[in-house]
Image (cartoon, rainbow, N blue to C red):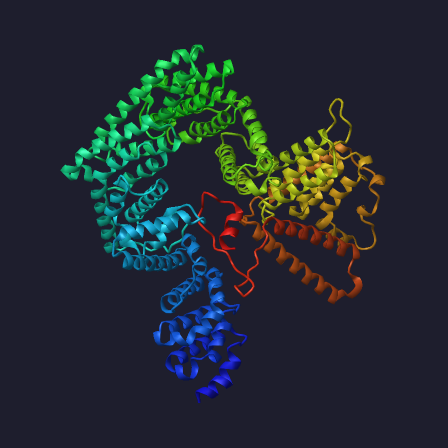
Amino acid sequence: MMNATFRGVFVHRYRDRLPEIRAACIEELGVWLINDPEDFLNDGCMKYLGWTLHDKQSPVRLQCVRALQAVYQEKEFIGRLELFTSRFKERMLGMVLDKDLDVAVEVVNLLLLIQQSTEGGLREEECGHIYPLVYASNRGLASAAGVFLFNKLKNVIDSENQVNGTSGNADLLQILISFYMQSEFHEHGAYLVDSLWGVAKAELRDWETMTTVLLKESGLMYEEEGALVELMICALRQAAQASPPVGRTQSKKLLSMKDKKAQEHDRRRLTMHFIPLLPQLLAKYSADAAIVTLLLKAPLYFNLEMYNSVPRLEKHLDQLLFQLCGIVEKHTAVTVLQACATLFSALCADSYTFSSRSHLAFSQLLDGLTECFSSYLSDLLQGTADDDSVYSAATTLKRIAALSSAKDTTVWKLFDPCLELLKSRIESRDLDKELMVPALKCAAFNLMWAKMNAVNSTPAEEELKRLKKEMRSFCKVCEMCLSLNQTEIRDQAFELLCDLLLLYSQTSVCSAPALQTLVLLPSDSLRSEMAAFLVDYVFSDSDDDELNVEEEMKITLLRRKRNQLAGYCKLVIYGVLDLNAATAVFKHYSKYFKDFGDIIKETVSKSKLISPVQSAKTVCLSLQQLFSEMLTEDHSQQDLSEIRELAKKLAMSFGVDLHRVRKPLVALHMDGIHFAFRKPREGEEPNMNLAFLEILSEFSFKLLRQDRTQLAAYLKSECPSAALSWPSVRMYQCSLEGRSSSKPREKEGGDAASSHDTPAAKRKRTTTPGSVASSARESLLDSLKSDEGSGFTEPESEDDFSIGFTMRKVKSAKQCHLSSSQTGTSLDQRDLNSNLTLLSLIEDGEEEEEEEEPEIDDYESGSDHESEFSLPSTRQTSASVLDELFD
């Protein structure tokens, strides 16, 4: 009976068209293999499971893997699976990169069973397919890979312990450090610790072993010490916060009361252990910038209240503060100083009863630094300081600037000395970036803390005026720095300007009317300098490829450029700069879409919320500026095509609700027409801007029918009669007539010829140009006002646009079919041409959208395809890293 069922049903249905039936067949085969191994546990039946591993549907593959797991769990079956394992092992190893994450997780578990149960297990190079998955962004897959890795490491440790007769976690830590150092796929220990946390939680919380190994004089090598400290700090974070690292997905599951108690217990335990030992670790590694930076993060995960609640721990706070001050005085690296500032900020929090002792230590440290800087200030201002004095002053300013970022330092009155130093250096053209960059930071942080103090108190009017005067003076200094030939000084000045102008803007004092005196708008010269900075240093093609700059450096430079562009765009969005200032951003949307497209697109979207009409005019102004720049240079058709491509991208940002964007689009077209036919200035050729109408035509498909008619009339009123036959004008006219010409023709019938049938040059004006223009403007305004009350919602994405016009195309096709079935061959040929013209415009828009956001092929994992898993952000974030990882 079973044999008949297998031969008559299963053999035919295991490859059924429906994946549900295929999955049911594989599930039942798994049951037969367990219940009746004598008849079914043979190569003739097992081959069906192997073949189904290549199924295109993930539910079928998942069921197949689960059936194999049940088979490999039976120890007495292992000897009969050798041929199957050798035949399909390669396929199973490839499935760890399955597109379906559930399948990939189960495959890793299956390979773990094969590793544990079979005699030969997996070779080391075969295990190499699974090791990199501990850094995967999906937490379930990473945890499964962590279990596999831990099992492998434990086997190695057990075999070594049997030979040496030793045991303990020190050996496991040693081999884990070796694995982490040899791993070339990732550099973040937080992801490795999170992957192993479920299976090796006890070993990773063995703080005693970790600190004992680190405090030994003859312990690990230098590189191993750094790796152990990083893994230890990552384990501290995991125990204290009980959350995965950034970029690793997890289900939104709230911790139960039991889990919260366990987490708090772990936090108290690690605090009790590390409070006495942390000063010793800092003293031992005080000269190592990388290790000290990591160790200074440890107190951020402590239960700091225990410094007071446990009497015997109070003395260790003074030891920690002593080591902290010594590290500040010893190091000049930005990362170390920033870590010190963050720890000082945490220890000085008013919520702790011991904060007064931390404040005292901080004040004494800053007193010494300020006194040291003041001793060199006079020589620096007079230009008589030697190299040693300049170096000492620069390092002192670095320390003060780092501490100022975390604590209020206004009482030390460092703004005026720093500002005088900056002015003297700029005037003498002695541009020392090591001295000027920290001076800029010190002065800026002083202004930021002063503004915060003004918000939290009620200062006198004279104090507010003095603060505004200081802000104006600093802006002038930064404006001069923007034109300097020093990259670090220039970039720092621009970034600080963006932050301070936003902090002293009208928006920031809306909730405090008494602070209106502090509002400072940038001057015209400063606005032009900031716009020029974007053009010269953000939207510029760097020569990194020619200079063989490392990939990591390229990413750092790009990140800094993105921050600078985002800072400028925030000034536009929050009203510090006019919307017209966004032209410096909008006109680079197409050329630099890969690097800054998301930022520019968001700025365009936000500008529409501020003022739809003004935003549309800004878009038009951006195109006008590009067109004018093209005319001043060598005019080429390629340049015009690039501007038209930009216009297409910007047109897509107006959405599909044509009634809602009616006013902005009409304003855009009227500005464009006026620009195309503006009177030439002295020395210019007439009609230089007519080709701009070709760019303007890219926005015509968004116009309503009545607006097209009115704009066509306005075009005729503005255009000289001799220019109506020019190609650019005819092209723009055709874009306006795409929709508006069909209904009038139906009304006229065949008695009267349409005005479009008459050559444009032979048409006669019945009114004066001025009257036509004024009537066109009035009719446009009247028609726009009549539709102001219509409320429509605008789709947020360009995908909605493509869907909307796809529906419109289907509707037009149905209407054409209905008309042809009723009237036969009486359909007007010109009306058909008109509809085809509109459809072609729509299709052009859709093609542009497809080019802008290409679709990714949605294929299932098969024998010829392997999918890639997204990894969390790394220090090496080049596109080639993922390819190298899974090749």
Residue 161, horizontal then vertical, whole percent? 28, 57
**Which image quadrant is residue 687 in?**
top right
Q: Residue at x 76, y 40 (%)?
A: 728
Asked if 720 appears above or below 303 in the picture, the reply is above
Quadrant of the rendered structure where residue 618 is? top right
In the foreground, 148 or 464 = 148
Visible residue check, residue 56: yes
Q: Residue at x 52, y 60 (%)?
A: 866
Q: Residue 870: horizontal and vertical position, in percent?
A: 47, 52
Q: Judge left or right: residue 783 versus residue 363.
A: right
Q: Quadrant of the N terminus?
A: bottom left
Total count of labels: 0
Q: Is residue 349 above or below residue 473?
A: below
Taking depth in this image into account, of 322 and 164 the one nearest to the observer is 164
Q: Is residue 291 left or right of residue 586?
A: left
Q: Is residue 193 visible?
A: no
Query: Quadrant of residue 344 in the image?
Result: top left
Q: Position of residue 528 (x, y in %)?
A: 57, 25
Q: Position of residue 294 (x, y in %)?
A: 33, 39
Foreground: 194 or 332?
332
Residue at 78% in and 35% down: 767
- Which residue is farthest bottom? 1
